[in-house]
Image: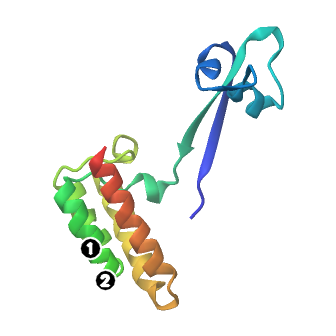
Amino acid sequence: MRRFLEFELRSGDKMAEKEGSVGGESLGAKGASGGPAPGGGGVVVQVREKKGPLRAAIPTMPFPMAVICLFLNTFIPGLGTFISAFTVLCGARSELLAERGACCVFWLNVAAAFIQIATAVIMVGWIMSIFWGMDMVILASQ
C-alpha cells in the first residue's frame, strides 16, 4: 500500500523555532533546507497524507465495532472489512462519503474485502487485512 505525502513550505513563521534548537539553530529550518533560513525566519513543513480511494473509504465506526472488525480481520482476512462496508449503509462516516456517496463507498469497501480474501493465500491479503483493521481502530479512536 502506497502512501503519498504532500508538503507545504512556508517561510517566515516562528513555529520552526519553537520545535527545538541545537547550538542556537532551529531544527525545523535546518532539517528542511539544509541550513538556517535567510532573514532569520524559520521554515515550517506541514505534512498531510494523501489517501487513495480505497483507504479514504474506510468508515469511522464506534470503537467497539472497530475492535471487533480488527479481531475478525486478524483471523479471517476480509471478514471485518466486509462487515465494515455495511456500517457505511447504517450511517458511519467516511472521508470519501461527501464526494462519492454511500453506495460507492460501500462498494469500495466490498472491493477491499474481496482483494483481502483473494490475496490471503499468498499472505498479502492477510497482512493488508490486519493493517486495514488497525486503521479502523485508529479512525475510531480519533
Residue 36 spot, x, y in % from top left? 81, 21
**Label tally:** 2
Report which residue position mark 2 lands on. Answer: 75
- Quadrant assignment, res 48: top right
Residue 73 spot, x, y in % from top left? 32, 75
> Is residue 37 found left or right of 48 in the rendered image?
right
Element under disc 1: helix
The type of residue carrying mark 1 is Phe
Q: Residue furthest front?
A: 23
Residues packed near mark 1 inside 10 Å, few (<14), some (14 to 19) or many (20 plus): some
- Quadrant assignment, res 68: bottom left
The type of residue carrying mark 2 is Phe
Image marks 1 and 2: residues in contact by CB distance under 8 Å? yes
Report which residue position mark 1 lands on. Answer: 71
**Residue that appears at 19% across and 52% down:** 62
Q: Residue furthest top?
A: 39
The N terminus - image quarter:
bottom right
**Residue that appears at 34% across and 69% down:** 110
> Is residue 41 found left or right of 105 in the rendered image?
right
> Is residue 102 found left or right of 11 in the rendered image?
left
Q: Which mark is residue 61?
A: none
Element under disc 2: helix
Residue 3 spot, x, y in % from top left? 59, 54
Up-down relation of residue 129 to residue 22 (above or below): below
**Residue that appears at 64% across and 22% down:** 16
Up-down relation of residue 105 to residue 72 (above or below): above
